[in-house]
Amino acid sequence: MIFISLFAFLALVILGHYFAWWLCLSACPRLRVYRFYLLAVFIGFTIFFLGAFMVLHRSDSAILAALYVLSAIFFGLLSQLMLFGVVAWVLRLVLRGCKYLKNKPLLLPRVFVIIALVFFALGTYNAFYPRIKTIHLQGWPEELQGKRFVQLSDLHLGAVYRPFWLEKIVRQTNALNPDFIIISGDLFDGSDEILAEFVPSLKDFSAPTIFVPGNHDYYVPAGVANETANSGDLIVLSDAAQEVSGLEIIGFNYLAREDSNLRREIQGLRPEADLVRIVVNHVPVDQAEAKNLGAKLLLSGHTHRGQLFPFSAFVRLLYGRFSYGLEDYEGMTTNTSAGAGTWGPPLRTLFPGEIVEFVIE
């Protein structure tokens, strides 16, 4: 399924270049003189964007990082031109007999260029200004009632999301006055290996903060993510457990989806304490394993809620009903967060990022 989704993604991107190109040329006929240069720019930025990420975490070049950010932003705009280029092309085909559109051939493509720009602007806003989402947990032990905690996921700190953005997230989180905070993976993006600049902001979290690594946290040099988290006074849990605020938090180490099964050995478990357990697994899988550990709640991220339409459909194919939001698994509550940051283009169409607040009732 992963290979099918990857192939579908690449096919959509390759085909999408044509529709973005067609839309721009149709909206502005004067560009036809430069049509091959325009296509070369589209393809060049895409190749640079996809390739730069692969080498950026091995480089400390500020110029390369800046170019990566610019190419990521441009690819976000290009993705919307691709999407609405397809819509405009289909509509033109369906309405080919409409005399009004025949008399005004520039109207349809220009309308959809404007729509693409609006979606790009709104998507950029959604990417940098996550919302607060509050979830009320009912039926928990009386001694835990009134406690609240925050789930942060997929911050993707690096070349795009800089320390000043993290400072804003920390202020928003602290304002919720949580008893503890859980970061459910992908704290770092992998696009920047100089992570010490994030330490001061990480230290500003006002409550005990647990960090469970995700796949992107392994894209930086070995151990750097955990070392930075430790320097920021975070509690790193990787196949380990920790008692926090009267609950036992279990963090699963990140495993590739095809390798996941009931085999983990969790360090530090305290079954004799009879504590309510929360399991954190970056990818929304292994519900059976969490249930087997007696978890009352499983927290995940990773999916970004699709981030860019229509990729939300592929996320749904991969992870089913656990791809986003609250679900029930044999009496255990699960929640998959949309995450606060983004990977690749800093763009979230349709749905904003989120900071999830849990209130135990």
Image: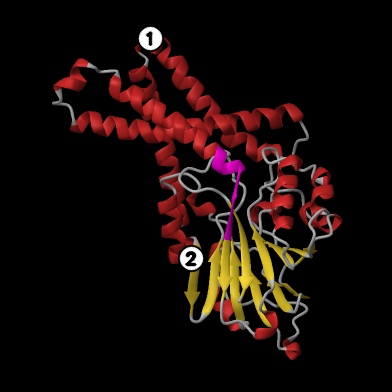
Q: Secondary structure at mark 1?
A: helix
The answer to whether residue 132 is magenta is yes
Q: Horizontal placement of 59 versus 307: left or right? A: right
For this rendering, which residue is in front, 176 or 197? 176
Q: Is residue 273 above or below residue 131?
A: below
Residue 222, image x and y in percent? 77, 53
Q: Quadrant of residue 299?
A: bottom right
Residue 17, image x and y in percent? 42, 30
Residue labelled with disc 1: 30
- Quadrant showing the C terminus: bottom right
Q: Residue 322: which disc? A: 2
Crowding at mark 2 (Cα within 10 Å: few <14, some 14-19, many 20+): many
Q: Amino acid at mark 2?
A: Phe
For this rendering, which residue is in front, 175 or 90? 175
Instruction: Report if residue 259 is visible in the image.
Output: no
Q: Are marks 2 and 1 in contact (CB under 8 Å)?
A: no
For this rendering, which residue is in front, 38 or 144? 144
Which residue range is magenta in the image? 125-133
Residue 100, image x and y in percent? 18, 21
Q: Horizontal placement of 184 versus 13: left or right? A: right
Question: Which of the marked residues, 2 or 1, is nearer the chain's N terminus?
Answer: 1
Q: Residue at x 64, y 73 (%)?
A: 279
For this rendering, which residue is in front, 186 or 44? 186
Instruction: Report if residue 118 is visible in the image.
Output: yes
Q: Residue at x 58, y 77 (%)?
A: 289
Q: Amino acid at mark 1?
A: Arg
